[in-house]
Image: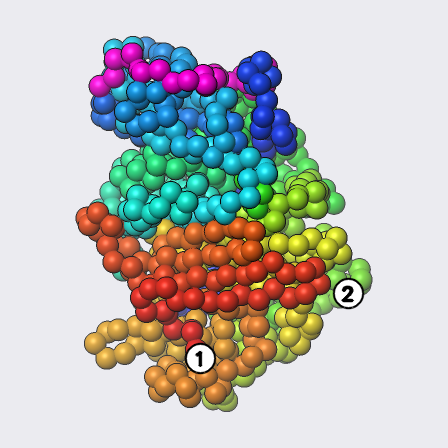
Amino acid sequence: MDSRWVRLAKKLPAMLNTRKPEGHFIMPKNSTRQIGRRAFMLYAAAMGATAAWARPMGVASRQRWTERRDLYPDGVASGDPDSTSVILWTRRPYEDGRHSATLWVEVADDAAFKHVVATSHTAVSDVADWTTRVLVGGLKPSHIYWYRFVDEAGAGSRVGRTITAPLVGDTSSKRFAFVSCQSVNEGAQNAYRRMIWEDERAPPDQQLCFVLHLGDFIYEVVEYPEEVPHRYDRTIFDIGKVPDARKVSNFHVPTTLEGYRMVYKAHIRDLDIQDARARWPFVCIGDNHEFSWQGWQSFIKYDGKVEPAQSLRVAANQAWWEFIPSRVRKSSGPDLDRFDPPAVNNAPIERFDAEGLGDEPNNRLALGSMTAYRAMRYGRHIELIITDHHSYTMEDPTTRPEADAFELPDFPFLPEEVMEVLDAGNAYADRNPPATIPFDGKTIPNFRKDEPPITLLGAEQKSWFKRAIAESKATWKIWAASNGTLDWRVDPQNLPKGLTKPWPGGGYACFGGGDLSGIHTERAELYDFIRDRKIEGFVTVSGDRHSFWAGYAAKALPPRAFEPVGVAFICGSLSAPGLAEAVEHRPKDYPLSPLFVAERPGGKFETTINLTLKHGVRSALEYARSGDLAAARRLSNPANAPHLEFIDMGGHGYAVVTAGPTALETEFVCIPRPVNRNERSDGGPLAYRIAHRVKPWASGAAPRLERVVLEGTPPLVLFP
Ligand SMILES: [Fe+2]
C-alpha cells in the first residue's frame, strides 16, 4: 500500500479546501435604508468614501465614452448592496509614470445611459494598485442599475450591471446564487457562464439578485505548467508568475502584497469571472486560500512547521480589500481610497488568551486590519449572517504534530470519540478532560486537556453572531458560513472482517477537524442557542468542501439524539478539483478504495464515497462489488447519516437559493468536471439540476426537506 495515498486520503479534506481567512463593516442597520441625501453624505464622509447621490430623474449622458477594455483589464464589479446604495469598483492602471489619476463614474437606469441618475469623480492611484471604490446612494430599492467608468481622455470601462436590495418590508421571493472555490490555475469557470446564460433568459422575478461568494475567490497556491503540467485530471494553466514567491512543494505562494495582487488579477482576468462580476453585485467572504492554504489567525504552516506571518496576513487583507468591493471594516478607518495597512512585524506568537487567540500585539493588529464578518438584510425574508472562519480560529488539532500518534496507517479517518476529546479540550466531560486517550492498544497523552475548546469564530464574532441571529426578524436567517457545518462521518465498525485491519475505534469515524464537522463543542453551543431562543428559519449555506450537500443542522448524530434545528446546504466548487477526482488517481491496491470510488469497464468511475457517507461502508462495498443499487440499499445503515438528504462528492457548479414566505428552496446546478473552458454560450451541458425545498417549521419541530430532480441524471446516492 502506498503510504502517501493513505496520508493523502487522511489529509484530503484539509488539502482540498483548506481553511482559514478575514474580516466588518456594515452600515448600522437601517442606516441607509431610507435616509436622505444629507444623511447619506454625512455617512459617506464618515466612511471617507467617494460618494455619489442619485437624482430622482435621469438625464442623458453627456460624457464622452469609448469602451476600452484593454485599459481596464480587470473589468468592473459591485458589492454589498443595500436598499439605497451599493459600492462600485474598477481598476484603471497607468504606466506613464504618474501616481494617481481621476476617473468619472456614471450610474444609469438603462444600459444605453440615456437616463443617468448619478455621477461622481473618483481617484485611482498606485497606492491601491489603481483600484477604486465608489459608494453610490440615493438609489431605488430592488432596482437594476448600469454603471461605467471613464478616464479624462474619454476611455471607458465596460458597462456593469448591479441591483439594489429590496426594502425590509418587501414580501416578494428573492433569489441569489452561492458559490465557492474558483481556480483559474487548475480549472475553467464554465459554471459562471451557465449562470449568466440562464439569468439572461429568466423572467425578471426569477433572476438572481446577487452572488454570495463563500471564499477561495483566489487560490494563492500557484502552479507553473512548465513544472507541473497536470494534477489529477487537470491541465495546469499558465496564470503568470507570483513575484517574490515562496516555493512550497509544487506551489508558488505569495510572500508580499504584490504577490497577492498578482494572484487576484490572474483570477479576475478570467473572462467568465469578469463577466459574472459585471452582471451581479457580489457579497464575499474569504475562506483559507485568500490568506494561506494551511494558515489561521496570522500563522502559516508548511511541512508541518508553524511560522508567525503577521505581515503576510495584513498583505492578504489589503489585497482582498482592494479587489473585492465590500462593506468590511478596516482599522485604518472608513476611507475607501486606500487600505493604509498597520505596521506589523512577524514576532513570535507564543501565548494565547482564554479563547485561543494569539496574545501578541502584532497578531491582534494584523487581524484587526480588516474585520469582514457582517450581516445583510435583504427584504422581508432574507437575513444573511456572514462569518469569517479563519481570522480568529485555533489551529486544527488533528494537524498538530502531537496528533500524529493518532494516525492509523490503514484508515484515512479518525475515531469520533478521539475527535471529541481533541475538540473539547479542557471542557470535555464537564471540564474533566482525561489525561490520556486510549487508542489502538496504546495510551496517548491528551495534549488538549489544558486548552480551550476549538473555536472557529472566536469569542467576539460568536457574541456578534448570536446577537445578529436572535435579533433578526427575517423569515430565513441564513448563516453564510464559508466552511461546511454538516458532519462527514463513516461507520468503519461495520467493515467486514478481513478487508483490512480491524477498526480500532469504539464506533463511528470522522474525516478530521478544521470545519464544523469536527468542531462539535462550538457547533453545539450555537445550535443550543438557536433551540433555546426558539429561533425559526435557520439555514446554513457553505462552500469549501468542493462537493454538494443538503441536510439538517444537528449538533449530534445517533446513537445520541438527532434533533435538527435547521437545514444546511453546501455548494460544489465552481472549478477547483474535489475529493472524488483525487480518489480516481488513487493507488489501485488500497483495500478501502471501494469506499471512495468504483472503477468500471472502460475506465468509468462511480463515486461510491457518496454511498459511504450517506449509507455506510457496507452499502458502498456492495455497490462497488456488484453495481446493484437495490442490494446496496438493503445494507444501508440508517444511523450513519440521518442528517444528510443529498451528497455528491463529485459535483461542481453553483447553488441558487429562492427565499419566500412559504418556502426556501436551494437548487444545485451541477456541471461536468470543468477541466477546460467550454466555448458554448451556455458554458456547456448540465450534469443535473436538483432542488431541495423546506417549508417554515415551528420552533422545536423538525424541518423536512423535499427533493425535486429538475433535470439530468442525479449522482450515486439517490435511492430509493
Ligand atoms: Fe476551496
Farthest residue, direction left: 679
Q: Judge by depth and name the residue closer to the eye, 449 or 393.
A: 393
Quarter of the image containing the N terminus?
A: bottom left
- Residue 322 lies left or right of residue 524; in this view the side is left
Q: Report the Cα–Cα distance between label 1 and label 2.
A: 40 Å
Residue 653 is left or right of residue 299, and the answer is left
Quarter of the view holding residue 270: top left
x, y percent for residue 269: 29, 35
State which quadrant residue 184 falls in: top left
Tell me which residue sits at (48%, 39%) in the image.
284
Q: Is residue 206 visible?
A: yes
Write the start and end of the magenta stretch as one range.
42-66
Asked if residue 529 is positioned above or below residue 98 in the image, the reply reads below
Residue at horizontal 37%, vertical 57%? 669
Residue placed at 24% from the left, 26% from the top? 69
Residue at image x 48%, y 87%? 634
Residue linked to disc 2: 429
